[in-house]
Image (cartoon, rainbow, N blue to C red):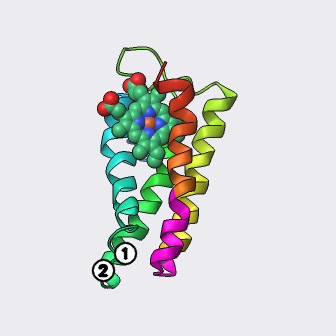
Amino acid sequence: MRTIVVVILGSLALLAVAQAPSYKAKPVGNLKQVMRSIPYPNSDIIFAVQTTAPKDDDEWKKVQNAAIAISETANLITLPGRLREDGKPVPVQNADWNKFARGLVEAGQACYKAALSKNQEAVSGCTDKLSGACSNCHDVYRDK
Ligand code: HEC
């Protein structure tokens, strides 16, 4: 009887270990590092289309990927626990912060759609929305 109980408890413990998530989303860099590593280089890829049209499918794919990275940035900058460069918490609880983050999702999606159409003018058309999504938030939160 005791053996059975031990075996059952042992199996339950193993099961619990197997099911425990081995990773929980948490910030790695500060906000400035995220800005420099994700939205900054990826918005450059999209802005560059205004002057130089991608010349083949591979190059269009890079623009599409950059647009996805822009939208995904919203998830990273609304993750609780991230700090700004100065050590203050990113204000993820603020309504306008979340509204500005949503602006990135929308701008990224607009640019993604434009990049899928492989039309230089269409991508140029999404860049106002994109730069607006950055500056709307920077006006309130970065430059002060
Ligand atoms: C929801 C708000 C928000 C949005 C949207 C946003 N940023 Fe930022 N950004 C900030 C804040 C706040 C900082 C200051 C970082 C800090 O304090 O750690 C910053 C800093 C930066 C920096 C660092 C500047 C430096 O001093 O090196 C770059 C580059 C940057 N953002 C690019 C972008 C780009 C490009 C976009 C749009 C595609 C964007 N950001 C969208 C809030 C935002």
Label 1 Cα crowd, 10 Å radius (few <14 / some 14-19 / many 20+) = some
Which residue sits at x=58%, y=64%? 110
Q: CA distance from mark 1 to mark 2?
A: 5 Å
Which residue sits at x=35%, y=46%? 40
Which residue sits at x=57%, y=62%? 109
Q: Main secondary structure of the magenta part?
A: helix
Tell me if residue 70 can be seen.
yes
Query: The residue tagged with tag 1: helix, strand or loop?
Result: helix
Which residues make up the magenta segment?
A: 116-127
Q: Is mark 2 within 8 Å of ligand 1?
A: no
The residue singled out by tag 2 in the image is: 58
The percent coordinates of residue 34 (x first, y second) are 36, 38
Does 59 appear above or below 136?
below
The percent coordinates of residue 126 (x first, y second) are 54, 63
Tell me if residue 8 can be seen.
no
Determine contact: label 1, label 2, CB under 8 Å. yes
